[in-house]
Image (cartoon, grey):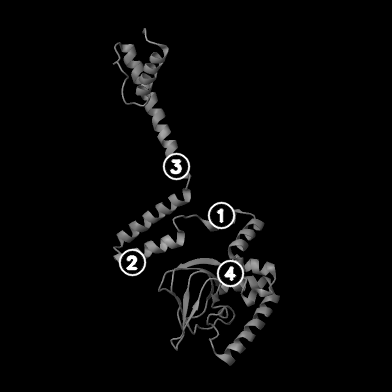
Amino acid sequence: QNDSWGKQYSHALFKAMSHMLCIGYGQQAPEGMTDVWLTMLSMIVGATCYAMFIGHATALIQSLDSSRRQYQEKYKQVEQYMSFHKLPGDTRQRIHEYYEHRYQGKMFDEENILGELSEPLKEEIINFNCRNLVANMPLFANADPNFVTAMLTKLRFEVFQPGDFIIREGTVGKKMYFIQHGVVSILTKGNKETKLSDGSYFGEICLLTRGRRTASVRADTYCRLYSLSVDNFNEVLEEYPMMRRAFETVAMDRLDRIARSRPRPPCSPSR
């Protein structure tokens, strides 16, 4: 009682923190019943505040990177799925690598996000992400910008691992592909390989002819591609009938050149 104010407040703070953090009852044990009940009340209030602090701190940390947390939760489900079906180790490793390259540690519902935006914002984002993919494509070179934008909204993102066959010879062509990043090999019957990389495309003629693939396409590296299906392509062409005739003219000219030179079949890839 005769100590300085500094020491008195230090002891008071020590006693209060001991109660509030629920790690003790201070320097001296409570003596009377009043001290006992006040100490217990202080501990209860302190434990409640401590739990609320921990809960809010945890929620704050998780909210700082919610997309990574969603990815981790999703991959836990994938791991449980692989364990339930007792998949072999090499398959599990390929699935793990696919998720790493496909989502890169973050997961979000892009379709839902774009669906909530206004049309101008949605088109701006899509044009920013995909415009370079069709910039060098002759079929889109002189096309109506609104038509190109409508086409870009139909693109679907896909990832292929090294050794995956993106296209197999003899199958009906239902998609064309734009290479955002990666290297693919075009395999023809003569065992001749042609390499395509970033900014290239393949399978475009089959959008109009619906013919069968006469070459296979294999991913040499991890490939990030955008695909455009025949149905989506035709859906956009219904709104732009003039572009259909222009596309058919370009396709026929291209098929004639291919038939004369025969460096590649109608559905084979091109730059």
In the visual, does 106 lie left or right of 20? Answer: right
In x, y percent, where is residue 105? 44, 56
Characterize the local packing of mark 1: few (<14), some (14-19) or many (20 or more) Cα atoms within 10 angstroms: few
Question: Three-letter amino acid code at disc 4?
Answer: Leu
Q: Which residue is mark 3?
A: 61
Mark 3 burial class by Cα count in 10 Å: few <14, some 14-19, many 20+: few
Mark earlier in primary sequence (2, 1): 2
CA separation in Å, label 4 and label 3 = 37 Å
Q: Residue at x 54, y 78 (%)?
A: 203
Quarter of the image containing the N terminus? top left
Is residue 31 positioned above or below 212 on the image? above
Of callouts 4 and 3, the N-terminal one: 3
Give percent across and percent down for residue 154: 58, 67
Residue at 48% x, 83% y is: 215
The first of marks 2 and 3 along the sequence is 3
Q: Amino acid at mark 3?
A: Ile
- Classify mark 3: helix, strand or loop: helix
| Mark 2 Cα shell of 10 Å, populated few (<14), some (14-19), many (≥20) | few
The answer to whether residue 41 is visible is no
The tag on residue 91 is: 2
Q: Residue 267's quadrant in the figure?
A: bottom right
Considering the numbered disc 2 on the image, is that residue within a helix, a strand or a loop? helix
Pair 4/1: label in front: 4
Q: Which residue is mark 1?
A: 113
Quote the CA–CA distance across marks 4 and 2: 32 Å
Give the mark, 4 or 1, whose residue is nearer the N terminus: 1
**Could you tell me how far apart the alpha carbons at marks 4 and 1 are, in whole angstroms?**
22 Å
Q: CA distance from mark 2 to mark 3?
A: 34 Å
Q: Does dot 4 land on a helix, a strand or a loop? A: helix
Q: Is residue 133 above or below residue 106?
A: below
Q: Horizontal and vertical percent for residue 200? A: 55, 74
